[in-house]
Image (spheres, rainbow, N blue to C red):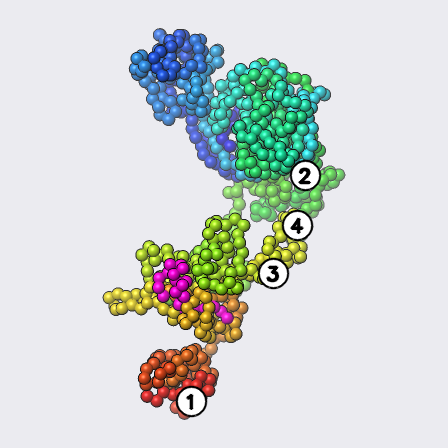
């Protein structure tokens, strides 16, 4: 909403406040400032002149005139002009030599077209009051010769622009902004709608409302004998231009002017083009309408139309039809003012991608009481400026709408804001907004008073009925529907700066949960091990699943499709984290970073077999029932939390200290073991075959009997499909499984002060026996005295025989209450070896 400050001052007795001070007050009241622009200050030395003679110059490709213009000086000035819309005797705006026009354009004397032009005659665009550059700006005949055009037309002004949010539709008018400014400065204001239209018994034009859900107020007034050639007053043109609207013709300009001033959109019909009575209704199948922008539109059954016997003549509250447009011969006018459904207008505007100044106001809510007053003001202006006659009669079709009332405790704003405003302040501020406020006892017989909502009654005790207020919001504030809306009005008018800054009390508890702690520990552990965290979009495509070499029956191929995907290549919700990590790895390698270790934690989305294809869409007017909540839960996919890593290049970097080490499958397995250990659990690692890993270099990790995830080297086909570096490795675990298996609070174990005893043992086992299986057998056999076990050597060669391997372990024994003897440690070691022999077929290496 753009408006000049001078227009606002017409209705508000502002003190000596500049535009910035006004804008600050509006911002403090909750209206968002977009910009402040000072206009007209740069225009200098432009005066009123009278055309004395015109000499048409021939021999040029376009009309050129050499004009003698009287500007109140000793002698007339001769000027070159290419416009042809003025004649001898017209008063025009003349920029004299040395003049400055908007944008810093300087005017001087210069020779052109074989003559000296001693200045220039200005158009509206050259003066910054519109976009019309087709002709010269013609001033009224009684304009004083030689007068300063800037002062005469009021070109020097400040223009304020507000960004109006959807709940502040009243601020799309001078009337609404004037009310806010007057309240902010504590000064009187005059309502431009405070007029008394004459009462008529006759109809201006027959009209009716066929659909009360589309329109509840429809007013028509008529003007006859209108002069279609009448010019719009210059002051009105200037104000329209300053507000960002283009002056068109008197009839159109009057309706636009009043829409800006009052907030009520109006429309003028050519009565000679109307056939039969007007009806407001919804569109019928197959109807079409050519609108004023010369576009033929296919109408939808939900569209709101103004129609006559010929069919649709206007899209209600959006744009008029071309068939009944005001033309240069229109002398009989019908002025329409109405109150259309806000949601109906908004949906129609969006369906047709047709946003107009009228639809912007209707979809935000227009005062339903304005049509009678706005239409009468339009008639008065058309009669005054267009020489017409106001016909006796008014058509007023309406549907009774009971005004809504809100019951609110007088101290509700106090409790919301944490500030003691007091009952008198609450009542005063609500009345300033335009509300009618009475005590509940005085309103006991008033129909429509609603019970106090339960959330308003929260507190140590119910409010005293004597302290309950019955509030009727004004007709121009359809956004006030709830006690909290009223509390917001009190708070903003009293000043947001009065609200205290109070930190919320810390909730009782022990801080983070064990699950939250685990997630943080996992991230810190991986980062400390050299992995860099990434965050990818949770979307994949069917091509990604094919690249992972997943079988047709793999559960990861069962996905959810997005209704409106960001990319047609990735329309599915991810069922694994790996594709996102692979793409990030490829992007880094492509930019010269070949040694990469990445990790990501996030949700994956796994639809359950037989789940409903679509979740029910519920309203917001009540709390959903348990059955409805169960229906939503059944349609939602399972969303486990996962963590994954991907490695390529060198894991230990090369440098002056020596040769590095390339990342291998064992690093991926160790990353998985690290994550499991952060949960206080010990994983069991087993060889497995699972896509997308290499069948001979894939490990499955278990906690008890629960599968946690997989790790290892990727299959060469997967590497090729995603364009990954050779021998890329990856790991993916399901943190949700670890969270369910958390052992709970860690119990501190006393540290023994007795010395440790170590025993080394080397076992020969078949090459296919997993190291983890041998270690588990040793732990089981060693018993309670075993403190730790560490594999320090793996050997394969002739000394252990073909198909075998030697595993060398260090066993550390310690007791909490004594120093162990050699016999005790030897017995524990022998028991461990015996158990390994029984479980894995291992035997002690002798050489």
Residue that badge 1 annotates = 830
User: Which is more foreground, mark 1 or mark 4?
Assistant: 1
The residue closer to the viewer here, 689 or 581, is 689
The residue closer to the viewer here, 259 or 56, is 56
In the rendered image, residue 35, in percent from the top left (x then y), is placed at 45, 34
Residue 714 drawn in magenta = yes
- Residue interval drawn in magenta: 707-727
First of labels 3, 4 by sequence position = 3
Q: Give the residue displayed 46% in from the left and 60% down from the top.
A: 546
Cα–Cα span, label 2 and label 3: 47 Å
Secondary element type, mark 3: loop
User: Residue lying farthest bottom?
Assistant: 823
First of labels 2, 3 by sequence position = 2
Q: Is residue 622 left or right of residue 588?
A: right
Q: Give the residue displayed 39% in from the left and 65% down from the top.
A: 716
User: Which disc is residue 610 wearing?
Assistant: 3
């Amino acid at each position: 909403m753009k408006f000049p400050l001078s227009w606002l001052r017409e209705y508000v007795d502002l003190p000596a406040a500049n535009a910035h001070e006004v804008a600050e007050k509006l911002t403090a009241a909750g209206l968002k400032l977009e910009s402040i622009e000072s206009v007209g200050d740069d225009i200098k030395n432009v005066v009123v002149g009278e055309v004395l003679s015109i000499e048409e110059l021939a021999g040029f490709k376009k009309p050129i005139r050499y004009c003698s213009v009287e500007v109140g000086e000793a002698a007339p000035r001769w000027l070159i002009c290419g416009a042809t819309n003025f004649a001898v005797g017209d008063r025009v705006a003349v920029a004299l030599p040395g003049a400055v026009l908007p944008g810093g354009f300087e005017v001087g004397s210069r020779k052109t077209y074989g003559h000296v032009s001693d200045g220039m005659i200005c158009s509206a665009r050259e003066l910054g009051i519109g976009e019309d550059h087709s002709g010269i700006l013609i001033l009224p005949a009684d304009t004083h010769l030689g007068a300063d055009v800037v002062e005469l037309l009021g070109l020097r002004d400040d223009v304020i622009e507000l960004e109006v949010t959807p709940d502040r539709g009243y601020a799309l008018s001078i009337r609404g902004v004037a009310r806010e400014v007057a309240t902010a400065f504590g000064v009187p204001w005059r309502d431009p709608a405070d007029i008394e239209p004459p009462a008529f018994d006759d109809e201006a034009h027959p009209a009716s409302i066929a659909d009360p859900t589309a329109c509840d107020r429809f007013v028509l007034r008529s003007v006859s004998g209108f002069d279609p050639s009448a010019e719009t007053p210059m002051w009105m043109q200037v104000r329209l231009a300053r507000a960002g609207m283009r002056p068109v013709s008197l009839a159109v300009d009057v309706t636009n002017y009043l829409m800006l001033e009052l907030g009520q959109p109006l429309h003028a019909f050519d009565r000679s083009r109307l056939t039969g009575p007007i009806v407001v209704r919804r569109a019928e199948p197959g109807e079409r309408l050519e609108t004023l922008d010369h576009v033929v539109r296919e109408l939808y059954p939900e569209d709101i139309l103004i129609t006559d016997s010929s069919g649709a003549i206007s899209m209600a509250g959006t744009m008029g039809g071309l068939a009944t447009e005001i033309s240069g011969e229109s002398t009989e006018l019908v002025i329409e003012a109405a109150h259309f459904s806000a949601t109906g207008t908004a949906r129609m505007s969006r369906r047709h991608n047709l946003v107009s100044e009228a639809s912007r106001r209707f979809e935000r809510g227009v005062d339903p009481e304005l049509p009678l007053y706005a239409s009468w003001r339009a008639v008065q202006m058309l009669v005054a400026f267009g020489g017409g006659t106001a016909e006796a009669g008014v058509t007023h079709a309406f549907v009774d709408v009971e005004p809504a009332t809100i019951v609110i405790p007088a101290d509700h704003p106090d409790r919301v804001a944490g500030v003691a405003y007091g009952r008198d302040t609450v009542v005063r501020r609500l009345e300033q907004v335009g509300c009618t406020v009475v005590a509940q006892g005085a309103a006991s017989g008033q129909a429509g008073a609603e019970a106090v909502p339960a959330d308003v009654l929260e507190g140590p005790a119910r409010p005293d009925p004597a302290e309950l207020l019955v509030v009727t919001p004004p007709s121009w504030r359809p956004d006030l529907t709830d006690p909290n809306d009223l509390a917001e009005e009190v708070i903003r008018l009293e000043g947001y700066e009065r609200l205290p800054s109070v930190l919320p009390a810390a909730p009782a508890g022990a801080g983070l949960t064990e699950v939250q702690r685990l997630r943080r520990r996992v991230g810190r552990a991986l980062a400390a091990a050299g992995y860099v965290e990434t965050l990818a979009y949770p979307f994949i495509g069917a091509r990604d699943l094919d690249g992972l070499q997943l079988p047709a029956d793999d559960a990861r191929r069962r996905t959810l499709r997005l209704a409106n995907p960001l990319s047609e290549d990735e329309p599915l919700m991810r069922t694994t984290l790996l594709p996102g990590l692979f793409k990030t790895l490829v992007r880094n390698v492509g930019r010269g970073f070949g040694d990469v270790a990445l990790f990501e934690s996030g949700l994956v989305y796994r639809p359950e077999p037989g789940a409903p294809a679509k979740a029910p869409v519920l309203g917001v007017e009540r709390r959903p029932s348990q059955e409805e909540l169960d229906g939503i839960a059944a349609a939602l996919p399972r969303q486990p939390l996962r963590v994954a890593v991907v490695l390529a290049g060198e894991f230990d970097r090369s440098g002056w200290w020596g040769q590095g080490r390339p990342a291998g499958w064992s690093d991926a397995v160790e990353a998985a073991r690290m994550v499991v250990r952060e949960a206080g659990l010990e994983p069991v690692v087993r060889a497995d075959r699972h896509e997308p890993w290499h069948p001979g270099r894939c490990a499955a990790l278990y906690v008890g009997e629960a599968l946690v995830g997989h790790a290892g080297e990727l299959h060469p086909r997967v590497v090729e499909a995603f364009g990954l570096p050779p021998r890329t490795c990856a790991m993916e675990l399901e943190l949700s499984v670890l969270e369910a298996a958390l052992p709970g609070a860690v119990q501190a174990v006393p540290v023994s002060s007795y010395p440790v005893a170590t025993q080394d043992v080397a076992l020969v086992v078949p090459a296919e026996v997993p190291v983890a299986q041998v270690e588990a057998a040793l732990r089981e056999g060693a018993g309670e005295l075993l403190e730790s076990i560490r594999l320090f050597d793996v050997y394969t060669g002739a000394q252990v025989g073909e198909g075998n391997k030697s595993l060398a372990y260090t066993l550390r024994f310690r007791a909490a209450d004594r120093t162990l003897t050699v016999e005790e440690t030897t017995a524990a070691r022998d028991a461990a070896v015996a158990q390994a022999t029984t479980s894995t077929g291992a035997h002690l290496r002798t050489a």
